[in-house]
Image (cartoon, rainbow, N blue to C red):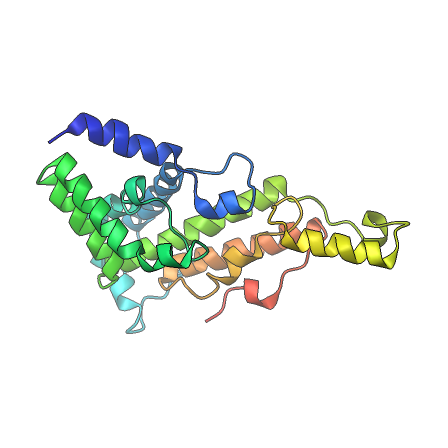
Amino acid sequence: MDSLTFISDICGQLKKLKRTGWVRHNIPLPESDSDHMHRCAMCALLLTQPPDPRDDYSSPSNQKFHPSKINTTKLLRMAVTHDLCESIAGDITPHCDSGLIASKYDKEEEAMKKIREIVGDPLGLELFELWKEYEEQETAEALYCKDIDKFEMIVQGYEYEKEHLQHKQKEDESNGGESDEKRQKIKEEEAHKKDVRNEPLRGFFVSTNKAIKSPLFRRLDKELRERREVMLQEKGWSVTEEERQRD
């Protein structure tokens, strides 16, 4: 057991590890893994509240999500540790190298085994089992944690757009006095740039448009997307149908 190494090296690395998706889009001061998991934990606390009457848990597929059936202590501990493995394995996303993506589970499992050794049981075993349960996606707590993971990501994306996305310029304003050939070249250059200042973070909202399953977070997801659409319209940007919530 080496508690100091766990707190300093493992948890400390999570505070320094910037989330890959935001780095790819040149986000100023992108959040860390620790930032992400902290708000995930805050989301998990919502399950300690009485059910909201706007959330329908009556259907067979939704009954398992009723807050009274959720081990909220487990969910909270899962939410605040679900990316712990990334302190060693790194933040591997679908946009990383194909070989890295293929080895993602193995790398993360090895990382959790190492963390278990550092922490020592019984906590080390609990951390490993929480990670494994989250990855297997079979329990209601794991399903909720995945919903929270996706929801927190798009909340953060919305906040980055709100803070950094510039108002869209009309084409004749942004490229005034330039030839058609030069305008086309500018468009091609901008298309290859991934920068939140120049373009909304559409991919994050498209990839999650039907990922969230629980009634509570589907409602919050829809509310967020509607709020985002208003914000983008105020900045002169449109929203595609794929960015809206889908069944």
Give 211 or 62, whichever is nearer the viewer: 211
* Left or right, 175 with reference to 34: right
Determine if residue 206 is in view: yes
* Left or right, 137 with reference to 211: left
In the rendered image, residue 197, in percent from the top left (x then y), is placed at 65, 44
**Against 173, is 120 above or below?**
above
In the rendered image, residue 209, in percent from the top left (x then y), is placed at 48, 64
In the rendered image, residue 67, in percent from the top left (x then y), is placed at 27, 56
The quarter in which the N terminus is drawn is top left
**Against 29, is 67 above or below?**
below
The structure residue drawn at horizontal position 91% and vertical position 49%, both measured from the top left corner, is: 177
Give 225 or 203, whichever is nearer the viewer: 203
**Against 208, is 163 above or below?**
above
In the rendered image, residue 36, in percent from the top left (x then y), is placed at 39, 42
Give 74 or 124, whichever is nearer the viewer: 124
Q: How many marks?
A: 0
